[in-house]
Amino acid sequence: MPTTLSGCPVARTVDLLGDKWSLLIIRDAFCGVRRFGQFHRGLGVAKNILSTRLRTLVDAGVLRSEPASDGTSYREYVLTDEGRGLFDVIVALRQWGEEHAVAPGEEYVPLIDRTTGEPLARLRLVRPDGSAVGPDDTHLGEPRRMP
């Protein structure tokens, strides 16, 4: 039974983060980008769109704006704990793209584990016993209230 858009966590998340620019801002924030100018140069997005997306992400608690760490009058955008919680989402999008959106022989930049020096292993959902969970292994439960 499908859920209504207002009660669906996926719909709410896509409404907040589903915009291409928002996801790329979050990706860049994980790579250490912190200033408006850095986001602008790296993404090539119009300044008004970037400003709106940054404000939305700050208002949503994904990023926080703070004084620049070097003492200048600039502001920096830093991932909050909620924003850092999107790491798995960004990695999943990256890994799907590596598998389905990068052509054979095409160059791409992998995400490397700092400890091992190797590309990250493919994300997968597992049960407590370690066995894999796929789309055919799940269904929507009864509505619940958040604690």
Image (spheres, rainbow, N blue to C red):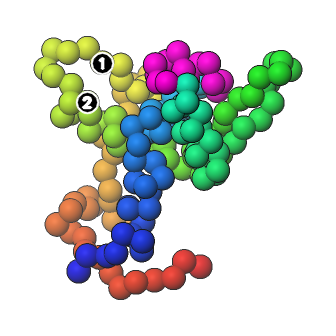
Q: Which of 105 and 52 is in front in this view?
A: 52
Q: Are marks 1 and 2 in contact (CB under 8 Å)?
A: yes
Q: Position of residue 126 (x, y in %)?
A: 32, 59
Q: Which quarter of the rendering shows the N terminus?
A: bottom left
Given residues 113 and 39, the one toward you in this image is 39
Q: In which quarter of the image is the C terminus?
A: bottom right
Q: Quadrant of residue 101?
A: top left
Residue pushed farthest left? 104
Residue visible at 83% across and 21% down in the picture: 73
Residue count near mark 1 (Cα–Cα under 10 Å), binned few <14, some 14–19, many ≥20: few
Above or below for 12 versus 85: below
Is residue 74 something one can see in this rendering? yes
Q: Is 105 situated above or below 86?
A: above
Residue at screen point 47% across, 24% down = 45
Q: What residue type is labelled 1?
A: Tyr
Q: Which amino acid does label 2 sit on?
A: Glu
Label 1 vs 2, first from the N-terminus:
2
Query: Which residue, given by chain and number where applicable, does mark 1 sit on?
Result: 108
Q: Which of 23 and 129 is in front in this view?
A: 23
Residue 62 in percent (x, y) is at 60, 47
Residue at 31% x, 50% y is 124
- 40 falls in the magenta region: yes
Q: Is residue 48 left or right of residue 24?
A: right
Residue that label 2 marks: 98
